[in-house]
Structures are given as structure tokens and as C-alpha cells.
Image: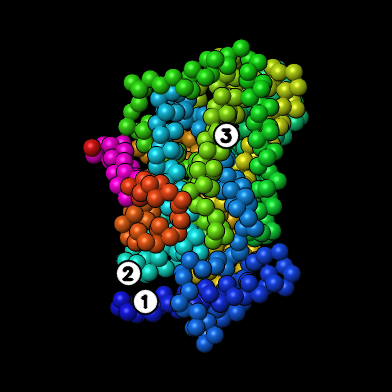
Amino acid sequence: MTAAGQRHKNLLKRLAMMSTLERNHQKSHRGRPGPELVRPGSSPHWKSTGKTEARAVMSTGDRQSIHGQWSSRLAFIMAATGSAVGLGNIWKFPYITGENGGGAFVLVYILCVAGLGIPLLMAEVMLGRRGRQTPINTMRTLAGEANASQGWQLIGWAGTLAGVLILSYYSVIGGWTIGYIVHAAIGDFSGLTGDGATSLFGDFVGSPLAQVGWHTAFMAITIVIVARGVRNGLEKAVTALIPMLVVLLLILLGYAMTTGHFMQGLTFLFSPDVTHLSGTSVLTALGHAFFTLSLGMGTIMVYGSYIPKDTSIAGTSIAVAVADTVVALIAGMAIFPIVFANGLAPGAGPRLIFETIPVAFGHMAGGTLFGTLFFVLLLIAAWTSAISLTEPAVTMLIENFNVTRRAAALWTGLATWLLGFGTVLSFNVWADVKVLGLNFFEHLDFLTSNLMLPIGAISMALFAGWVMSKTMSREELDMKSEAGYALWHVLIRIVAPIAVSIILLHAIGLY
Ligand code: TRP
């Protein structure tokens, strides 16, 4: 397409968005609490009309998402925190910290969150709010506006795919938490020894059929919420669940302090021994910083597309990153003392919390109650994150294939559910089927966390730093301090792409 043709197409899109804005505006004046889902296809708003033509001079920052909008700044913070805080913080962070030797890994992870995670979070929210569409269409529109290659859309496609890939294994682990709520509640943890916990977990994951059942249960509760939409489903779910989660974590931390091994846990987490650090450990820490903040695949872009125009992007991004990191560190501080108090192995892998936690609760007064609470907590955290993982795919189906939100949720759920069988089998029948030393689940995790997320994140950084004009990013971020903006711009334009490339190439062995 010629550049002029492209510009024309974008103008039409922009106009289309504006007519949506108008309709939403009228709606909210009919006494409704706010904008809600307006489907493309339910009315011809992809065509421009004479009426909207006159508004073409409006700033593009006034685009509105057709999928709805958060009711407030706090609702966005809650939803983004709900997405960020999940199995990544409570299941994955402790086990990869254990596998990578503790302190030094934690230090690199914190540096990655602060130096790369926060600026990238801001960039992704910004792109989403500017584009106000699904990641694919947002990148298409923004690339068009900057007269850049339509190849930038690939960020959207790759991210949408990454979301489905991650969710396919996320749901299996989410299913474990449901199964473990049942085990805890019926008292299976009481008096459990290390060996007992190992065989409990072995029996649990050993049956592919039962695993498919738990995985199905998890996918089902996720898809039900997703099908109900932004205002009705997501927001209500997260506002109720996040505060509960924090309370339950603090109860666990309180218990850890009584184990007598609290200091040992703190030393493991916070005294860095850099000699433990390999190139792959650094890449794992980086990949996890993106994973835990839900960065690099468009989740945050979609959530950003629902935020009100006047929300401060910097403030909310920092709040989300801090909350997410605090939760991971509390989880680590709660889990490692329990690991050491019971002579368990920090490097046990994905089964770490499923083998160590039950032993701890099995020896604790009130362990049945606390053990059940713990896995309820984990389920809640996993659930809100899983909901967010579906958003790019679901909104893409709605925008590009003209289906209802419910149908989009079902199709995404079905594809993810089927793909999840690979992970189910990775813990039993296919456990030892390895290619290049990794089984199906391990490949999926490496491919998504260590490759797709970092590559997605640098691509967004390059777009926000080099392709998007400074005028536009400055206007969109609207930061109070010019120095803050300048720092962000350098981090996004120079530091993030270079640091991420070096870490990636070094781990792959090219550097
Ligand atoms: N951040 C979540 C966790 O730590 C998982 C998650 C949700 C995610 N959305 C994402 C990871 C998008 C990567 C990309 O459990």
C-alpha cells in the first residue's frame, strides 16, 4: 500500500474510533455507570460518516477502546496488579530462585524489575492507551501514524501467541492448586514427611486423566470470567480478590517467623554470591522480571487500552511493579524458612512449593486450615493472572473476526486447553521425553519466558523509543518532571535494548 493509502486507512480507523467514543459517551449519559462493551459489527463504526468527519482534528489520544474502560485509576492498578501477581510470584519465583542459588539471582531480578521492568511497563501501558485496540491493531495503527513499517504488527501477533502458550501451562499449574486445596482440606498433609510429600505429589501428577480434570476446572473458571467482559468480569473479580490475597500471605509470613529458620531464609534470599551466576541464570532472572510483571506480550497493552486518559502512567506503573515485587519477596521469605526448617531442597524445581509447603503445614497446629488457605491464595493469584493472559487473543478475535466476547473466550479457552495436554503429559508420560535436554513443559517455559517475552519487550522499547516521536510519547506519558521523562527515554531507547540483547546473546552463547 502506498504511504498516502496507508494514511487514508488510518484516518478512517481514527474516525471510526471516534464514533465509538461518541456512542459510549451518550450511553454513559443515559444513566449507565460507564462505557461498556460495544462490538464491531453491532453497528457500522468501521466506516466513517459525515458526522464524525468534522471531528478528525481531535487528538488521537481521544481514541476509545471498544471493549470498555476501567472505572477508575485504582481499578486499573488493581487489575494490573492482579495480572502481575500470580503463580510467577508464589510458585515460580521461589523455585527458580532455589535452582539458581538464591541471593545473586534475586539481586539481578530486582535490578531487572527496577531498571528495565518499570520503564517497559510504562512503554507498554502507553502504547496500549495510545492505540486503544488489541495489540495487533494497536501496533498497526501506531506504526501507520508514525509512517513506519507494518511489520511492527508482529509484536502483536507474537504476543497474542505467547499469551496462549503461557496460559496452556499456567492452567495446568493452576489446576494443581485446585487439587491441592482438596488434598489440604481433607487433611492429607497432616503428619506428612518429606518422602510422604514427594509421593503425594508423584501420585498427584502421575495420573494424566486426573491432571486433565484439574486443568479443565482451571480453564473453565478462567473462561467464565473472561466471557463476562471487562467491567462485569475482570474488574469485579480483581477488586475483591487482591486484598484477600495480601492478608493470606501475611498470615503465612507470620508462621514462617516462628519456624526458627527465618534468618536462614533471609540469608539465602538476600546475601548475593555472584559466583553462582551463569549467563542462563541472568537470562532467567531477566525473563522472570518480564513474566512477573506480565510484560512483553500485550497483556499490559490491552489493560492500558482500557485506562482513562488522565491516569498517570508513571505513577501507576511504579505502584504495580512495587506491589508485585513485594508479594514475590514476601512469598520467598515465607517459603524458604519452611524449606530449611524441614531439611528440604531449595532446588527441587516446579514441585518445590507442592512438596515443601504440605510438609510444613503437616507439622503445624491448624495446618489443615492454613494449608487450605495457602492453596486458595495461590488459586486466586493464578486466576486473576490467567484472565489477563487471555485478553490479547480474546480482544483480537472480537476486533478482527467479528465474534461475540463469549465466543472469543470459548475459542481461546479451547485452543489453550488442548495445548495444555502437552504440559499435563510433561509431568508423567512424557517426563523424560527430552529434546536438547528439556521436556515439553521446559521448552514451553524457556521459549516464552526467556525468548518471546524479552524479544517482545525490546521490540516495544525500540518502537516507543525510536519509532514513536518524542512529542507523542511526552504527551502521552505527561510526566510531571522533564528529567523523569528524559530518564525514561534513555532507558527505553538505549539501555533496555542493549541490556536485553547482551543478556540474550550471552545466554545463547553468541557473546
Ligand atoms: N505475571 C503473571 C505471574 O507472575 C503471569 C502473567 C499474566 C503473564 N499475564 C502475563 C506473564 C503476560 C507474561 C505475560 O504469574
Name of the residue lying farthest toward the bottom? 50
Label for residue 111? none
Name of the residue lying farthest toward the left? 511
Label for residue 327? 3
The residue beneath circle 1 is 7
Is residue 210 rendered magenta in the image?
Answer: no
Is residue 494 rendered magenta in the image?
Answer: yes
- Report the magenta residues as a range: 491-510
Which mark is first along the chain, 1 or 3? 1
Q: The residue tagged with tag 3: helix, strand or loop?
A: helix
The residue beneath circle 2 is 147
Please identify the dominant SS of the magenta region. helix
User: Height in image: 377 above or below 233?
Assistant: above
Question: Could you give the CA–CA distance between mark 3 and mark 1, rounded to whole angstroms?
Answer: 45 Å
Residue drawn at (50%, 52%) of the image: 313
- Callout 2–callout 1 Cβ contact below 8 Å: yes
Q: Is residue 314 visible?
A: yes
User: Height in image: 482 above or below 7?
Assistant: above
User: Any atom of ligand 1 within 8 Å of the CB at mark 1?
Assistant: no
Locate residue 437, reporting x and y percent: 37, 34
